[in-house]
């Protein structure tokens, strides 16, 4: 049985890599067709699409009165998007950040940091994190930023070949089909990995904090690594930090509207603190260095490892 799971894992990883490559190729075409920046396409198309698993988990868990599950998923994914995904990309390929993208990056990092601080403050002081009012505000924030970013024109239009309507239609179809394959193959990868881990008798807390946590960010990881490898840095940044914005506003806002979310466990507070730390470091790298090299990528990965160890430790002492 374990050999079947290993075979499924390998095949799913191959499909995931190939479909992610197709997503990036056609997303770049769509960027040129619509005349908007790559970071806008990364946010509007890729990040919203890759956040669909988190959104579905959010709706289901909140409907069942388990909003904390959706909150934990959001915070864990956001940390992985910055520290793990951008860390791996920077470590192996290097990541350059254009001056024109800095404003958009700063807006997202500031907003997600403010939301994180608010959740920590509210959960400690009032024992209530997010309700209907906060949910509506978060959804309005998502709509406002989506409108703002959609009006960002590409500065590369004069230096790249334009894409006709005839070329754009198949590009959109290939993008959509490949994105669906990314999401499906990611699910198979996680499922197979969990079954293999269970066969090896790994603790559930370890499986949850590593395989499942990584699995929720696997679509972003596969797509962003392809984007960075092909030097489409705007697409990678738009997806990685755009997914954070989507998770903190659209996903968390939807969950809050459906049901109140209370976050009091030390595990969530720790996750929020690590999310804030990740935002601060990325903002510094963007504003000062304008790039992430192998050293910076290594730092991101080291902090992510510390985060995983911290979460596992808190789960063990908390008995969860």
Image (spheres, helix red, strand yellow):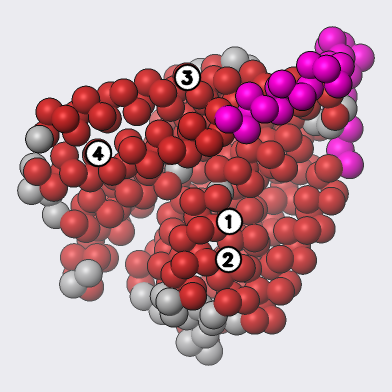
- Could you say which is closer to the camera, residue 190 or residue 279? 190
Instruction: Name the residue carrying label 4.
Output: 192
Mark 2 and mark 1 in contact (Cβ < 8 Å)? yes
Q: Residue at x 46, y 60 (%)?
A: 57
Q: Nearer the viewer, mark 3 or mark 1?
A: 3
Q: Earlier in the sequence, mark 3 or mark 4?
A: 3
| Disc number for residue 247 | 1
**Residue 98 in view (yes/no):** no
Q: Earlier in the sequence, mark 1 or mark 4?
A: 4
- Give x and y (percent) for residue 71: 47, 66
Instruction: Name the residue carrying label 2.
Output: 252
Instruction: Name the residue carrying label 3.
Output: 18
Helix, strand or loop at label 4? It is helix
Q: Quadrant of residue 281?
A: top right
Q: Is residue 146 left or right of residue 93?
A: right
Q: Is residue 167 magenta?
A: yes
- Could you say which is closer to the camera, residue 167 or residue 65? 167
């Amino acid at each position: 049985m374990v050999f079947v799971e290993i075979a499924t894992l390998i095949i799913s990883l191959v499909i995931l890599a190939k479909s992610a490559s197709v997503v990036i190729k056609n997303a770049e075409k769509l960027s040129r067709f619509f005349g908007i920046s790559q970071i806008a396409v990364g946010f509007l198309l890729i990040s919203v699409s890759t956040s669909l698993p988190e959104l579905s988990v959010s709706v289901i868990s909140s409907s069942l009165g388990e909003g904390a599950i959706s909150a934990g998923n959001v915070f864990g994914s956001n940390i992985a998007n910055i520290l793990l995904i951008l860390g791996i990309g920077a470590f192996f390929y290097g990541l350059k950040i254009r001056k024109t993208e800095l404003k958009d990056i700063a807006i997202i990092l500031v907003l997600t940091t403010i939301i994180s601080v608010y959740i920590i403050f509210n959960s400690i002081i009032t024992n209530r994190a997010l309700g209907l009012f906060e949910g509506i505000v978060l959804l309005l924030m998502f709509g406002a930023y989506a409108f703002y970013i959609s009006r960002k024109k590409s500065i590369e239009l004069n230096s790249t070949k334009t894409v006709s309507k005839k070329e754009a239609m198949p590009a959109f179809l290939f993008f959509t089909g490949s994105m669906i394959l990314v999401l499906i193959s990611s699910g198979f990868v996680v499922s197979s990995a969990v079954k293999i881990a269970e066969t090896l008798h790994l603790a559930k807390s370890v499986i949850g904090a590593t395989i499942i946590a990584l699995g929720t960010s696997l679509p972003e990881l596969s797509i962003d690594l392809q984007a960075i490898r092909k030097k489409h840095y705007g697409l990678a940044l738009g997806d990685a930090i755009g997914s954070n914005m989507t998770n903190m506003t659209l996903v968390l806002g939807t969950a809050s509207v459906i049901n109140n979310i209370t976050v009091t466990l030390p595990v969530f507070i720790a996750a929020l603190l690590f999310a804030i730390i990740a935002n601060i470091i990325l903002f510094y790298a963007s504003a000062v260095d304008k790039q992430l090299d192998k050293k910076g990528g290594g730092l991101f990965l080291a902090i992510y490892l510390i985060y995983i160890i911290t979460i596992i430790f808190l789960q063990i002492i908390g008995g969860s």
